[in-house]
Image (cartoon, grey):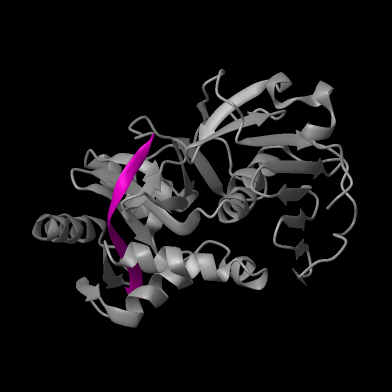
Amino acid sequence: MISVVTPEADEASSSDALLYCYQIYGLTIRSEIPLPQLLPGIEQAPADVVVRYGPLPDCLEHPMDEGVEWQATRDEFLFAVPDVARYWIYQGKEIWIERAPLANDDDVRTFLLGSTMGILLHQRQIWALHASAVKTDQGAVLFTGPSGAGKSTTLSGMLNRGYAMVADDVSGIVIDKLGCPQVLSAFPHRRLWANTAEQLDLSIEGIPRVRKSLDKFLFPVDNFSPGVLPLHRVYALVPHGKPGIEVIPIDGINKFTCLLSNTYRRHFVQSVGWGAGHFQLITEALQRIEVVAIRRPTDDFLLDELLDCIETDMAQGSG
């Protein structure tokens, strides 16, 4: 374990003394760092996770796996983002951050709420799926797929049709006592590239960037559904070289492969021995949900047609 002063070791740095309290993925976060994107937490609730600044060593003592900028064990994960910060996640309960001298606050928060939070979810045995999500009458509907598939664009289109957002980029999924998959809400912001915002008639004036160096912006969302929702259906967005949109149910091993391949930072999960529990979670979820491929033209998003297909499919499968 990294030699830092943990909350348990220093009464003066108790989580109750931390300035900020938030909620995300059903967790109460006590943070030394302001995270204005998140919903306020319940002040009286005990902390599930604490977030602090602190010095971190260069490496873990006995890493099970490592890459150019990261190292991991079953309980710890240490990674670096050059010129931004180094992050240490421990047992799904603690996040320590050593920021670079000239780091931008928004950049530090972006990686805290992105990769860091995704790893923390995995440590807590919460399935982090690379997917946006909305609330429907049947429960949460997720849109997954590789980067550039159109998850945030589809989410934005669904918001315009009156659906409430549950998550933008990463959806947290657990299995309840009855064996039913449940989706934990994230936070009421969505990330959009400048050209996507323009296509959606959204002004970027006054909207903060996701990162200082990127033309990607963090838009607040008014219609947001906090809490927990049953997982109803997953749509896998697949750009293809054909005209028109195809709706194709995914069955059998392809269903499992689709969800596994879209697990957030899945190579980290497999590399440190978290895989068995992760596979079991996916297997249990697949017994209760449908997975459907939505194939759309690569060069023409056809958003309205795509949304029409999704709503028709949801209506046909609601029974």
Q: Position of residue 311 (x, y in %)?
A: 16, 54
Is residue 148 positioned above or below 80 on the image? below
Bounds of the magenta span?
Answer: 227-239
Which quadrant: the C terminus?
bottom left
Q: Main secondary structure of the magenta part?
A: strand
User: Which of the 4 quarters of the picture holds residue 257?
Assistant: bottom left
Task: Residue 299: tell me if it is visible.
Answer: no
Is residue 268 found left or right of 216 in the rendered image? right
Does residue 288 show up magenta in the picture?
no
Is residue 107 positioned above or below 235 on the image? above
Q: Residue at x 58, y 63 (%)?
A: 265
Q: Position of residue 7 (x, y in %)?
A: 77, 33
Is residue 48 positioned above or below 121 on the image? above
Is residue 48 found left or right of 302 in the rendered image? right
Does residue 229 show up magenta in the picture?
yes
**Hey, which residue is sitting farthest front in the picture?**
177
Q: Residue at x 38, y 35 (%)?
A: 227
User: Which of the 4 quarters of the picture holds residue 284?
Assistant: bottom left
Seen from the viewer's position, the closer of residues 205 and 47 is 47
Q: Residue at x 56, y 28 (%)?
A: 22
The number of callouts visible is 0
Q: Position of residue 305 (x, y in %)?
A: 19, 60
Is residue 228 found left or right of 169 in the rendered image? left
Is residue 90 positioned above or below 59 on the image? above
Q: Residue at x 26, y 77 (%)?
A: 251
Q: Position of residue 182 (x, y in %)?
A: 35, 49
